[in-house]
Image (cartoon, rainbow, N blue to C red):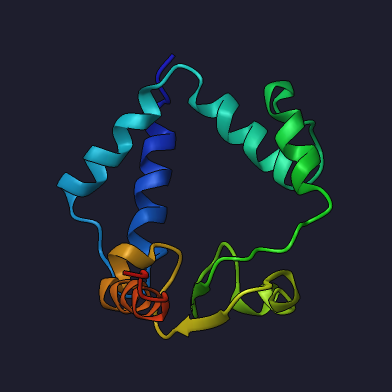
Amino acid sequence: MPVCNALRGTARHKARRRPPNYRFDDATYNQTAASFDNPDFVDVVIQSYRHRHGAALGDPALEAIEAQLAPQPSITVPTISLHGECDGVAAPEGLEGHAPHFAGVYESRVIPVAGHFLPREAPEAVTQAINDLDRSRPSPSR
């Protein structure tokens, strides 16, 4: 069953007010909102939040991967973590203390006046981080 129009209106309102420096136009919103018509949309969203907050088990098909990740193995690839200063989903200060999980080069960057949609809100910062990581790679041996 498609999501009712009231929920669509709520989602549109949130999409328009959440990003501090990016405004969804109708075409972008409509392209994204098509996902609301998936018959399991509401169930998937609710399960996602419950699992994220430890109130529900995950997908049994992914238990082996969950077991590998549970001990939080070190991340060995060079990493630049980007956080929107105005992110209403995952505030940058909630991510402090992550550096010990990275065995390779790690840098955390907070992007001013940006929220949760960094590729749309701050594409230059995302591109810069990708370019910086690319420049940090060792040159291939010849």
Q: Is residue 60 left or right of residue 33?
A: right
Left or right: 34, with 65 as reference point: left
11 or 48: nearer the viewer: 48
From the viewer's perspective, is 47 left or right of 128?
right
The residue at the point 37 percent across, 37 percent down is: 8
**The N terminus appears in which quarter of the rendering?**
top left
Q: Position of residue 51 (x, y in %)?
A: 73, 39
Q: x, y (%) of residue 33?
A: 31, 37
Q: Residue furthest front?
A: 142
Residue at left offset 44%, top offset 36% = 7
Quadrant position of residue 54? top right
Is residue 69 shown left or right of residue 40? right
In terms of depth relative to the viewer, which is nearer, 137 or 142? Answer: 142
Q: Quadrant of residue 131?
A: bottom left
Q: Could you say which quadrant of the image residue 77 lies in?
A: bottom right
Residue 17 on image: x %, y % = 38, 63
For the residue pair 86 and 4, the one nearer the viewer reads as 86
At x 31% / y 69%, what residue is drawn? 142
Instruction: State whether residue 110 is above or below residue 2.
Output: below
Return the residue nearer the eye: 63 or 24: 63
Residue 26 position, x and y percent, is 18, 48
Q: Residue at x 51, y 20 (%)?
A: 40
Looking at this view, name the residue that lies furthest to the left: 27
